Image (cartoon, grey):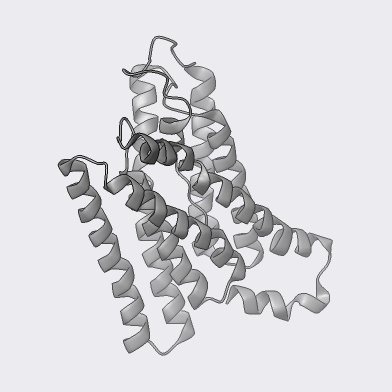
Amino acid sequence: MAMRRLLDDHDDMDFKEVLLKHIAPGLGCIIAFLMFVSPLKAVLQVRASKHLGDLNPLPLVAIIANCAAWLLYGCINADPYVILANEPGLLLGVFMTVSSYGFADPRARDLMLKALLFFTVIISGAGITIALFVERDHTASLISGYTAVFVLLCYYGAPLSTISEVVRSRSSASLFWPISVMNTVNGLLWVAYGTAVEDLFIAVPNAIGATFGLIQLVLIQCYPAKKAVVAVGGDRGDSDPLLQDSKHVA
């Protein structure tokens, strides 16, 4: 367990260990919050205008699923940093999803409901299996870890589709470089922490997330945003790019 390893190593901890096992995940928690809160402005605009507009609500459902899965993993492994990184995201995800649902069209509502039910069955099923049938801590950790990674693979569909669209259109208008930078830095911080506590479920997925962030930054340099790409109805501001990127944290 990550937290137990931290406590066991506390007496012999040097600066490098403090950096990797405490400072890195602590900063990761802060960046995670900034990433999860990034769509909030667009959602508040939806609540004020009572119209969904161009906002895509499915990534909001994905935030709930991703954070819930990693909260399960964090609780099973008694890892405070994983818990702290994802609890605010879960609360924000619920608020933003419920806020958007009421203003979505019937098709979008149907997709949101199906996605939410799908992820709920997966995550609750893992929790029930662990509670009723698993006795070994290691097995519980594996089940929750694989569940979180599965949800994350579904979550990575958004950045993959965005990368594909950028290459196809030769324009990075759908990318927002500050978010891509945060994706990269956040991923690297959690890779450092996961490596330090010898947790591949944390290190490997975040290495993939950091790689996506780097790819997005390269695409932003190679394919500058075309000024002609403007949404009908006015300036899109920061809302859509913020919702199209991956916001994974361990």
Q: What residue sits 33% from the left and 74% below the top? A: 126
Q: In which quadrant of the rendered view does residue 244 lie? A: top left
Looking at this rendering, what residue extends furthest in the top direction? 228
Q: What residue sits 82% from the left and 75% below the top? A: 12
Left or right of 32 on screen, residue 127: left
Return the residue nearer the eye: 191 or 240. 240
Q: In which quadrant of the rendered view does residue 95 lie? A: bottom left
Vertical relation: 24 (above or below) 135: above
Q: Position of residue 177 (x, y in %)?
A: 55, 29
Please tell me how many numbered marks the rendered image carries: 0
Q: Position of residue 49 (x, y in %)?
A: 35, 34
Vertical relation: 36 (above or below) 42: below
Vertical relation: 244 (above or below) 6: above
Q: Is residue 134 visible?
A: yes
Q: Position of residue 241 (x, y in %)?
A: 44, 31
Q: Position of residue 139 (x, y in %)?
A: 42, 80
Q: In which quadrant of the rendered view does residue 81 lie? A: bottom right
Return the residue nearer the eye: 11 or 58. 58
Left or right of 162 on screen, residue 116: left
The N terminus - image quarter: bottom right
Q: Is residue 159 visible?
A: no
